[in-house]
Amino acid sequence: ATPTALLTGTGRGAQLGILIRGPQVLEDTRTVDTIVLDKTGTVTTGVMAVGDVVALAGTPGAPAFSAAEVLRLAGAVEAASEHPIARAIAQHAEGFGPLPEVRGFSSAPGGGVRGDVDGVTVTAGQAGWLEHHGIRPTDAGAAAFGAAQEAGTTAVWVALDDTVAGFITLSDTVKDGSATAVERLRRLGLRPVLLTGDNRAVALRVAESVGIDAADVRAGVTPAGKVEAIRDLQAAGATVAMAGDGVNDAAALAQADLGIAMGSGTDVAIEAADLTVMGNSLEQVAQAIELSRRTLGTIK
Ligand code: ADP
Ligand code: MG
């Protein structure tokens, strides 16, 4: 394509709320044949709602905490995180009263959070994050947690003073238009793949509702694992676009042949992407690919 055609395409993109990093990006979009979609905040709204707060009996000798305490302490630590899960838990906890301050906060993308609240060390997140701190649930706790996941909820462990004290379940909603967009992407010849750090049952449920094959669902994937997943597809000969919004997606967006960020996403995701869709919708992702093909098709 001529530079003029590419610049025209870039300008047209801007009018549509599609911010393109440079004219060259339009050349790259033309050749993609696989589109990897992050689940939380990309296919789904990323506005999560707390379902149940479950208190578990601690290991023998450890103090037991009530569900209200589990929520209050977890909420206080999550208040320091921007993650959709964190926002939901903190907001829900705030509904029951002001949250105490957190000290010594730390977090890992795709892992969880940790900090001291009212003299209690609070660790919240997925099993690997707890394990990283030497915390293991009891068999009974793990069974209850597994059942919640099987039921299709996103479940998050809460440990207090390095003993599992309970878990919190959350749910998310698929964005209006995600299913239509997946269909449109397919018609553009792209194979959709769902990639998430969340559990498999939730991922399969979302995949089914938007029309992604179960065989193309990669769940329980760490941020580094997301990069690996993109690399594996590339190694198998695919030219890969990836759409995401989170801190946990940034490295994968950079690894993809075409990185697409949601406009409401985190700054690191937007910085790592070649293209940003200001409307935050998958339909706009399809539109971006249609735009590039039209721009390059007509004027070449
Ligand atoms: P996704 O790929 O769906 O955007 P992430 O990679 O951000 O998910 O997170 C993967 C998992 O890590 C979550 O499902 C959750 O179990 C855990 N996690 C991440 N951040 C937090 C947090 N702030 N609090 C609790 N758990 C978290
Ligand atoms: Mg996300």
Image: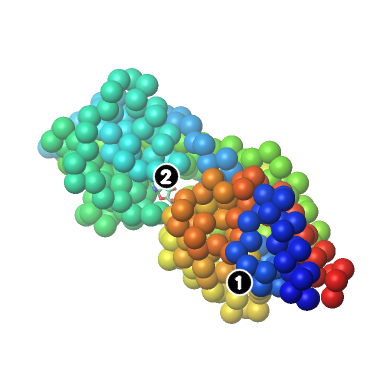
Q: Residues within 10 Å of mark 2 (few under 14, many from 20)?
A: many
Q: Nearer the viewer, residue 198 or 19?
A: 19
Callout 2: helix, strand or loop? Answer: loop
Judge left or right: residue 107 versus residue 171.
Answer: left
Quarter-of-image position of residue 116: top left
Q: Residues within 10 Å of mark 1 (few under 14, many from 20)?
A: many
Earlier residue among tags 1 and 2: 2
- Kind of residue sitting beneath label 2: His
State which quarter of the image contains the N terminus. bottom right
Judge left or right: residue 170 versus residue 61.
Answer: right
**Residue 254 percent location from the top left of the image:** 51, 68
Q: Is residue 293 visible?
A: no
Question: What residue would you read off at disc 2?
Answer: 83
Question: What residue would you read off at disc 1?
Answer: 257
- Does the beta carbon at disc 2 come under 8 Å from ligand 1? yes
Please determine whether, in this image, residue 239 is positioned above or below residue 218. below
Q: CA distance from mark 1 to mark 2?
A: 26 Å
**Residue 251 percent location from the top left of the image:** 47, 65
